[in-house]
Amino acid sequence: MADLRIDGRKKVKTLKADFKKAFGASLRVYTTAACKTPANDDATLASLMAKSGAKGGEATFGSNLRVGNFEKKLGEMFGIGVQVANPANTKLSDNDITLAAAGKE
């Protein structure tokens, strides 16, 4: 089982790469929880969080977590929107499957 550790110092491009390595799925990161504008790859999560007023922090996520819960938790912690997609990044994953299953779609 792979784990993913996230904190505010992490850059968006590093988060995407670490997510892909840990779970095999793709991660789309947005500047707000509404998922309208893609985040700049060189931005840190803390810089995105500052605009939203979110609390931040540090968390570790396991592969058995459901996609919908992961997306919700990152929105609450960092004030950003994320969407889990299949490994080819061509379609979004169902919210009811695990992160591990998303990497096998």
Image (cartoon, grey):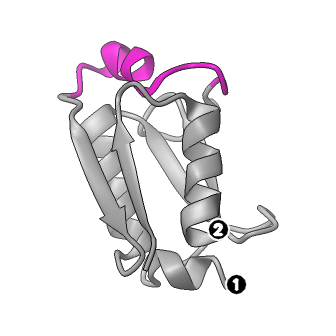
Amino acid type at image mark 2: Ala
Residue 7's mark?
none
Q: Label 2 belongs to which residue?
A: 25
Q: Amino acid at mark 1?
A: Glu
Q: Quadrant of residue 7?
A: top left
Residue shown at the point (24%, 19%) measured from the top left: 53
Q: Are marks 2 and 1 in contact (CB under 8 Å)?
A: yes
Q: Is residue 28 visible?
A: no
Which is more toward the observer, 22 or 64?
A: 22
Mark 1 Cα within 10 Å, few/some/many (few <14, many 20+)? some
Numbered disc 2: secondary structure: loop
Q: Quadrant of the N terminus?
A: bottom left
> Who's the residue at 54% across and 28% down the image?
11
Residue that appears at 40% across and 24% down: 9
8 relative to 57 in the view: left or right = right
Highlighted range, magenta: 40-54
Q: Is residue 25 magenta?
A: no
Among the two numbered marks 2 and 1 on one chain, the one whose residue lies closer to the N terminus: 2
Tell which of 44 and 97 is nearer to you: 44
Where residue 87 sits, quadrant-wise, is bottom right
Residue 42: in magenta span: yes
**Residue that carries the numbered disc 1 in the rendered image:** 105
Q: Is 21 in front, or is 91?
A: 21
Residue 16 location, x and y as percent? 61, 46
Disc 1 on helix, strand or loop? Answer: loop
Instruction: List x then y, in percent, for residue 35.
Output: 53, 41
Query: What crowding class fits label 2: few (fewer than 14 Cα within 10 Å), some (14-19), or many (20 or more)?
Result: many
- Location of residue 49 in the rendering, given as x and y in whole percent from the top left corner: 35, 23
Residue 91: name its quadrant: bottom right
- Position above or below: 48 against 25: above
